[in-house]
Image (cartoon, rainbow, N blue to C red):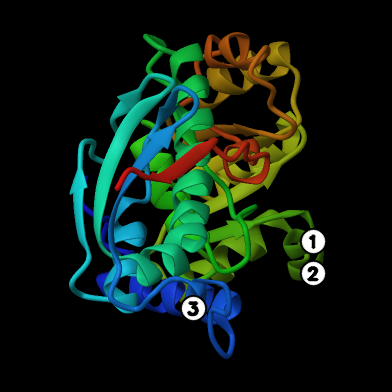
């Protein structure tokens, strides 16, 4: 799967470098038990059904350790695999494979976990036309990686960070004096990015519409109120539902007629996929 514009190869290089430094420190003491001239083939398996994400990070782990290591991937990011599926064969110096094993699998299991839970949520709203968005509730240092994994699972990205869109929340409104003031100030800061306003009531919704916000986030509204919000908005702005969204409630929220649902659980409540790497010769 192609990397999105916000994620570069240098980002992956940097993330992997930090992860390897954290794990190896001054040197891998255990790998040194293996003779330096030993070569092995290892088989990487997913112990459970999953949507795969993170192969580029695994590639980079072994590239940084030893460029002679060869990885024969049987899958691509975004692929669905069944339990006990072979993901890759890894061949090269045994010491380097052993040193990189855990770091490579940490990236793969975490990003595949993010993609997998995203796919479950996406399936729950299939056919409604609603787009599911991630949030900024990501693991520190893995923001871009997890947002990429959301794409692998069929979801969509909200803003990457504080720099590429403006989301005016309750405290911003209080500090600015009103929704109108906050939106007007946002336009002077950067009129090119999306300006979104979080509202908690229908009256605040009307104020956001009058201020001509691009998107309006309906924060913790019940479904009946969201249906009213859709009628009031009448496509004057995009509408996004947010706040404690569970997978059980997802379909009913989608059926209110909103455009987006943002879900922190996609990146926050990650179940790491169970992977196994075993030497076969």
Q: Position of residue 89 (x, y in %)?
A: 25, 45
Q: Nearer the viewer, mark 1 or mark 3?
A: 3
From mark 2 to mark 1, how far is it between C-alphas? Answer: 6 Å
Q: Residues within 10 Å of mark 3 (few under 14, many from 20)?
A: some
Looking at the image, can residue 160 be seen? no
Which residue lies under the disc numbered 1? 171
State the SS at label 1.
helix
Which residue lies under the disc numbered 2? 175
Q: Quadrant of the N terminus?
A: top left
Q: Position of residue 108 (x, y in %)?
A: 44, 49
Q: Position of residue 267 (x, y in %)?
A: 58, 45
Mark 1 or mark 3: name the one nearer the start of the chain: 3
State the SS at label 3.
helix
Q: Is residue 275 above or below residue 169?
A: above
Taking the view exactly as shown, the residue that stands out farthest to the bottom is 26
Q: Is residue 181 above or below residue 230?
A: below
Looking at the image, can residue 224 be seen? yes
Q: Residue at x 61, y 9 (%)?
A: 252
Q: Residue at x 73, y 64 (%)?
A: 172
**Labels 2 & 1 near each other (Cβ < 8 A):** yes
Q: Residue at x 49, y 62 (%)?
A: 103
Which residue lies under the disc numbered 3? 32
Q: Is residue 54 above or below residue 155?
A: below
């Amino acid at each position: 799967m192609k990397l999105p514009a916000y994620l570069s190869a240098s980002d992956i290089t940097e993330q992997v470098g930090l992860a390897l430094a954290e794990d190896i420190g001054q040197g891998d003491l255990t790998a040194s038990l293996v003779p330096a001239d030993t070569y092995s083939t290892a088989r990487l398996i997913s112990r459970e059904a999953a949507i795969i994400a993170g192969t580029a990070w695994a590639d980079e782990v072994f590239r940084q350790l030893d460029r002679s290591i060869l990885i024969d991937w049987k899958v691509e990011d975004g692929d669905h695999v069944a339990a006990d599926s072979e993901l890759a064969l890894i061949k090269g110096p045994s010491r380097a494979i052993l040193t990189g094993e855990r770091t490579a699998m940490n990236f793969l299991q975490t990003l595949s976990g993010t993609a997998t839970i995203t796919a479950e949520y996406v399936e729950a709203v299939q056919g409604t036309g609603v787009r599911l968005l991630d949030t900024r509730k990501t693991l520190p240092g893995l923001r871009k990686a997890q947002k990429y994994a959301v794409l692998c699972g069929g979801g969509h990205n909200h803003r990457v960070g504080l720099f590429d869109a403006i989301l005016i929340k309750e405290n911003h409104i209080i500090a600015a004096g009103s929704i109108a003031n906050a939106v007007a100030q946002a336009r002077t800061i950067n009129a090119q990015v999306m300006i979104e306003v979080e509202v908690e009531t229908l009256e605040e919704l009307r104020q956001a519409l009058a201020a001509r916000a691009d998107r309006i986030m309906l924060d913790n509204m019940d479904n009946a109120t969201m249906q009213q919000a859709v009628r009031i908005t009448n496509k004057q702005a995009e509408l996004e539902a947010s706040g404690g969204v569970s997978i059980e409630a997802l379909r009913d929220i989608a059926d209110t007629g909103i455009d987006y649902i943002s879900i922190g659980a996609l990146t926050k409540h990650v179940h790491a996929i169970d992977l196994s790497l075993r030497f076969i010769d």
